[in-house]
Image (spheres, rainbow, N blue to C red):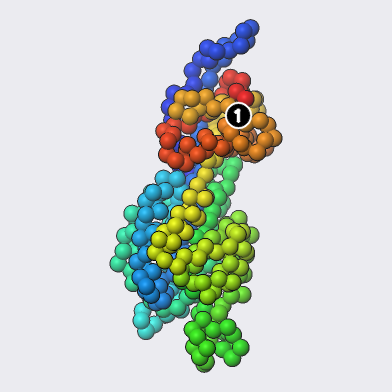
Amino acid sequence: GAEPAASADGGGDRGDAAEGEAICDELNLQLTRVTGNVLIILDRSNSMMDRGNWLAAREALYEVTAALERRLSFGLMVFPEVEGPGECTPTENVCEPASDLVVACGVGTARSIQRTLEDMETCGGTPTAVTLEGAGVYFSLEITPSHLPPSFVVPSYVVLATDGAPNCNGDADDRSCRCTAGPEGCVDFPWNCLDDERTFSAIEDLAERGVRVFVIGIAATAWGDVLDEMARLGGTEGALLADDHGAIESAFETVVEGVTSCDFVVGGRDPLADPNRVNLYMDGRAVAMDEPGGECGSGWTWIDDERSRIRLCGSDCDLLLGGAVDSVVVTFGCPTLI
């Protein structure tokens, strides 16, 4: 999604023009802050009740989404299935994957996520692969020109929080598989077999759609090798393993704060207009453009060839992410400050 940026009077006549240079007039341009889609996929299998991890994971989500719901578009899937005729119960549908999002990605969804989770109970196994396939369908529908502002694609992420390895594949070979339920847990019950290859494939499909996948392993150290490979295929360095309640919240915070954006989409300007006559103001303070071709060390820079997207850099980005900035304004008409 995208969030309209706050507006303020950052333009007007430039009275500080160099001697001999005509005083220029500035016109405020349309500015939209890029807010990435963050789809949280939460495991509610029965083992999540161990050591209170189900409560801890929910509390962590409440805190993180409430703190960042204006900067990111949060959505939620929960597996096994929580709604409709396929809902997981203690005796039925224990391997039914999530069929859809229970909260669609959007700005300001923290309260909806909390209401959805607060009375939910754990159930069943860990049908991770097919749930991730469903997430892929969602993103394939959302990332289209008709769903997003023109000229850019909203960055999208999956945050998978699970306390164990994927299973629930009835076609697995129970005689030779790696078992997620102990040495005897897969005898004549292939649903407990590790379903890693199908899960890897679903993550690779998400990555091909431009969706990065983060993995939080909740008290899942024994399955660290599988979770690390899932994260690697999803374009992240490795799984974050959280073995206590404080670590669970820290893991969510680390992932989510790392995907907040200092990017903006600029509109309202003739595409043929001179991009060297654009300036940016934060709370009325002129911010110099970073050196062309630089590494976005300070100030701001263009990030696309069409000159339609701007990124704040360095300490100015830090101020924005820290909530210390009330307005960001981009203007056209005066020579760019460098």
Residue at (49% x, 84% y) in the render: 181
- Residue 243 can be seen, yes or no: yes
Left or right, 160 with respect to 210, comes to left
Q: Position of residue 45 (x, y in %)?
A: 42, 75
Q: Quadrant of residue 332?
A: top right
Q: Residue furthest top?
A: 20
- Tag 1 residue: 289
Residue at (51% x, 72% y) in the render: 221
Hey, what amino acid is under mark 1? Answer: Met
- Residue 234 can be seen, yes or no: no
Secondary structure of the residue carrying tag 1 is loop
Residue at (62% x, 31% y) in the render: 290
Q: Position of residue 108 (x, y in %)?
A: 38, 49
Q: Position of residue 88 (x, y in %)?
A: 39, 77
Of the pair 147 and 50, the residue shown nearer to us: 50
In this rendering, the answer to whether 133 lies above or below 155 is below
In this rendering, the answer to whether 112 lies above or below 93 is above
In this rendering, the answer to whether 248 lies above or below 171 is above
**Label 1, residues with CA under 10 Å away: few <14, some 14-19, many ≥20:** many
